Amino acid sequence: MARIKIDLPEHFSFQTQLPIRITDLNYGGHLGNDALLSLLHEARVRFLKEHGYSELDFGGAGLIMSDVGIVYKGEGFYGDVLTVQVQAVEFSKYGFDLVYRLTNQNGREIAHAKTGMLCFDYGARKLQTIPAQARERLETKP
């Protein structure tokens, strides 16, 4: 069976810390896949805010997630504090990918992830071209 492979960049322009809460655990006693997706969402919102944007105002466009991929590298447990690194890559006419590396407080990798983000006009319910200024800001901010 083919496995998902997520290519991570050498450099990430953003990182944030997120604790694993008791409600993030599944019946196996570790971080659940649904909770991990929620942590990616929180990291994405913080990443966008750092750049002066939100999911509803990305330089005049909205953002909508087109796909997601997660590769699990280790277990996360209650009380762990995850460092989530985020970088925008693979820009196109309508969007870009965000890639994530999640590590625990001991530096152990928990997951790699990718979310495909498209620019979306929520009023017209259709895709729109990525705003040039927003693209430039994400591509150039260290």
Image (spheres, rainbow, N blue to C red):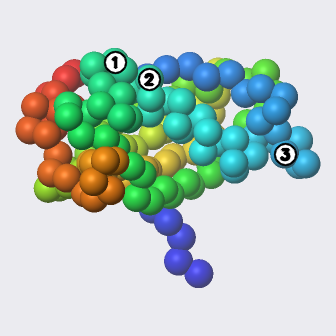
The amino acid sitting under disc 1 is: Glu
Marks 1,2: beta carbons within 8 A: yes
Q: Earlier in the sequence, mark 1 or mark 3?
A: 3
Query: Circle 1 is placed at which residue position?
Result: 50
On the rendered image, what quadrant is the C terminus found in? top left
Q: Position of residue 23 (x, y in %)?
A: 82, 32
SS for tag 1? Answer: helix
Nearest the viewer among 47 and 54 is 54
In screen coordinates, is 98 left or right of 131?
right
Mark nearer the viewer, 2 or 3? 2
Mark linked to residue 110 = none
- 10 Å crowding of disc 3: few (<14), some (14-19), many (20+): some
What residue do we see at 53% from left, 38% from top? 40
Please identify the quarter of the rendering in which residue 17 is found: top right
Quadrant (top left/top right/bottom left/bottom right) for the N terminus:
bottom right
Which residue corresponds to the image point at 44% horizontal and 33% vertical from the top-left?
A: 44
**Residue 58 versus residue 68 in the image, above or below:** above
Near-viewer residue (5 or 20): 20
What is the quadrant of residue 78 in the picture? top right
Side of 131 relative to 88 (left or right): left
Q: CA distance from mark 1 to mark 2?
A: 6 Å
Mark seen at residue 46? 2
The 10 Å Cα crowd at callout 2, few under 14, some 14 to 19, many 20 or more, is some
Q: Nearer the viewer, residue 36 or 119?
A: 119
Which residue type carries mark 2? Arg
Residue 72: x, y in percent? 62, 51
In the rendered structure, which amino acid carries the disc numbered 3?
Asn
- Residue topped by disc 3: 26
Q: Judge by depth and name the residue closer to the eye, 111 or 117.
A: 117
- Report the Cα–Cα distance between label 2 and label 3: 25 Å
